[in-house]
């Protein structure tokens, strides 16, 4: 798939596609090894080892995105189009679909802050089972969104939050405030971080499943509330039990989240 294909799809070069394929394989190996270490560690250390897998994968998203913007011929133009900025909170009203590895890592962080933990526990019943457009239309914010409009867990935020990079802040705003978000057109986003995140997701999910562990996607607020209420579910998951409710929304996110 060379330059002709890239022009047709306005997507990536052959080298970039190959980079994504290598990323699936390298993520698989690192996750497999990380999970093996976590499973052989005692309960006191297993959570930290799972969190280290998350730290590694989000570092990859950030580094590969920076690399793309610095080296791709369209990097400067793309960088100039990116609308996301600190304090812009419109998209932080979406359901956040993530792996259990990510949920465990974020929960460790949230558990260390009583205000964030309370926020997650209070929000969980409000978003239980609701589709993403309803959450937008009811304007139910992420429990980790700070009062200044910035993410309170920025350094450890999930991959999907890093991968949603908008070119259209007006549409982001409209999605949140229109009251009929489902009927709006999909928004334009920077595709590379999303593709990196998808490749990593594939590697993490395969390694988790091959380790005999529950490998479903979960919804962040629900998973946080479960772990905060019952921290032992992390050890149960590492033993091969399936304690997490699977996120089963099957209609696709309407606005690129
Ligand atoms: S985790 Fe942070 S970036 Fe992600 S939706 Fe919540 S507040 Fe926004």
Image: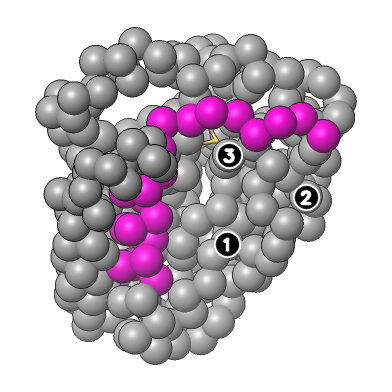
**Circle number at residue 125:** none
Q: CA distance from mark 3 to mark 2?
A: 14 Å
Mark closer to the observer (3, 2): 3
Quadrant position of residue 188:
top right
- Kindly tell me whether mark 3's CB lies below 8 Å from ligand 1: no
Residue toward you, 5 or 177:
5
Q: Is residue 245 above or below residue 8?
A: below
* 239 relative position to 126: left or right: left
Quadrant placement of the N terminus: bottom left
Secondary structure, mark 1, is: strand
| Residue highlighted by disc 1 | 218
| Residue highlighted by disc 2 | 131
Write the residue at 48% across / 30% down.
189
Q: How is the image coloured?
A: one colour
| Residue highlighted by disc 3 | 256
- The residue carrying pointer 3 sits among few (fewer than 14), some (14 to 19) or many (20 or more) residues within 10 Å by Cα, namely some
* 248 relative position to 11: left or right: right
* 145 relative position to 58: left or right: right
Mark closer to the observer (2, 1): 2
Q: Position of residue 146 (x, y in %)?
A: 54, 22
Precedes in sequence: disc 3 or disc 1: 1
Is residue 199 part of the magenta span, yes or no? yes
User: Magenta: predominant secondary structure element?
Assistant: helix
Write the residue at 33% across / 36% down.
7
Mark closer to the observer (3, 1): 3
Secondary structure, mark 2, is: loop
Q: Which residues are magenta?
A: 183-205
Q: CA distance from mark 2 to mark 1?
A: 13 Å
Quadrant placement of the C terminus: top right
């Amino acid at each position: 798939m060379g330059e002709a294909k890239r022009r047709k799809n306005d997507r990536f070069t052959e080298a970039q596609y190959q980079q994504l394929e290598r990323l699936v394989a390298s993520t698989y190996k690192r996750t497999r090894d990380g999970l093996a270490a976590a499973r052989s560690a005692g309960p006191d250390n297993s959570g930290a080892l799972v969190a280290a897998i998350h730290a590694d994968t989000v570092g990859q998203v950030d580094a590969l995105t920076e690399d793309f913007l610095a080296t791709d011929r369209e990097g400067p133009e793309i960088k100039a189009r990116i609308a996301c900025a600190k304090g812009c909170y419109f998209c932080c009203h979406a359901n956040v679909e993530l792996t259990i590895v990510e949920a465990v890592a974020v929960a460790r962080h949230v558990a260390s802050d009583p205000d964030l933990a309370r926020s997650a526990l209070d929000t969980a019943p409000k978003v239980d089972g609701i589709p993403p457009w309803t959450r937008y239309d009811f304007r139910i914010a992420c429990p980790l969104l700070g009062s200044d409009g910035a993410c309170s867990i920025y350094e450890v935020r999930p991959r999907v939050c890093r991968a949603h990079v908008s070119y259209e802040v007006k549409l982001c705003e409209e999605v949140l405030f229109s009251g009929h978000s489902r009927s709006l057109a999909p928004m334009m986003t920077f595709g590379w971080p999303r593709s990196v995140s998808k490749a990593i997701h594939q590697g993490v999910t395969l390694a988790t499943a091959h380790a005999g562990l529950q490998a479903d996607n979960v919804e962040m607020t629900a998973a946080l509330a479960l772990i905060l209420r019952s921290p032992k579910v992390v050890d149960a998951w590492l033993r091969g039990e399936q304690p997490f409710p699977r996120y089963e929304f099957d209609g696709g996110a309407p606005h690129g989240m």
